Image (spheres, grey):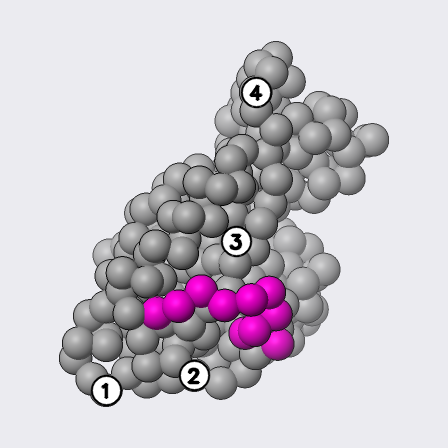
Amino acid sequence: MSGHSKWANIKHKKEKTDKAKAKIFTKIGKELTIAVREGGPDPASNSKLRDLIQKAKANNVPNENIERTIKKADGVKGADYEEITYEGYGPAGVAVIVTTTTDNRNRTAGNIRSYFSKYHGNMGTSGCVSFMFADKGMIVITDEDGDYDEDTLMEQALEAGAEDFSATEGVFEITTEPDDVYAVADALKAQNYNITSAEVTKIPSTYVNIDNEDDLKFMNLLLEKLDEDDDVLDVYHNCENCEN
């Protein structure tokens, strides 16, 4: 089983572990900022902020970083952001979902559309591919030094409420229901496992393996370009053999 989210795909290139952590820290910081600006800095009255604080802690974001981000967001009046999701197809019919936060809908839509067009895909209408994905919690644990016993970890994950478990070359992927992901991550952290990432992701029901080299090249370029865009939070796809 493979989640094929930006973070779950870390198993394909373990050297990207640090980069993946840095990305998720940046992403959570942006989400915290937006939540504070939308609903205020008090998690007691801002349920979205409360959930994001739990997510940040599950992903090992230091408490002082969380507090600093909330304080900064509360003190700085910025642009109004909105969350927009785009759907489309990459080369070879790969399904792609792009979630964004933006203060300029026209800029973001234009950029996303141009990426699809430039790299031999096309942006579709809302709902054109989302039915092919299911929301799931995904916890990734990287064990480069071989410190963890796979059977023990699987047993503890399932006891904590996980749905599924897989291991590939020292990287463990633990699937949960969306509402259970942070509780399961916390339970595993309490067992002294180092969590690489924990978040709600989208897992495709079917996968596409791209055989044509040009299609694969353009698909990887599309994913790379989307990943670099500051407005993009997450990219989900069902390409089996892409790099990201």
CA separation in Å, label 4 and label 3: 21 Å
CA separation in Å, label 3 and label 1: 27 Å
Q: Which residues are magenta?
A: 121-131
Q: Position of residue 187 (x, y in %)?
A: 64, 56
- How crowded is the residue under tag 1: few (<14 C-alpha within 10 Å), some, or many (20+)? few
Q: Position of residue 89 (x, y in %)?
A: 42, 72
- First-in-chain label (3 vs 2): 3
Task: Identify the residue position indicated by label 1 in the image.
Answer: 211
- How crowded is the residue under tag 3: few (<14 C-alpha within 10 Å), some, or many (20+)? some
Q: Which mark is residue 78?
A: 4
Front residue (pair 178, 156): 178
- Circles 4, 3 touching at the beta carbon (< 8 Å): no
Q: Could you tell whether 199 is left or right of 167 in the image?
A: right
Name of the residue lying farthest toward the left: 213
- First-in-chain label (4 vs 1): 4
Task: Identify the residue position indicated by label 2 in the image.
Answer: 207
Q: Quadrant of residue 235?
A: bottom left
Q: Which mark is residue 143?
A: none
- Circles 3, 1 touching at the beta carbon (< 8 Å): no
Task: Identify the residue position indicated by label 3 in the image.
Answer: 99
Q: Quadrant of the C terminus?
A: bottom left
Front residue (pair 198, 70): 70
Residue at 61% x, 70% y: name it. Answer: 127
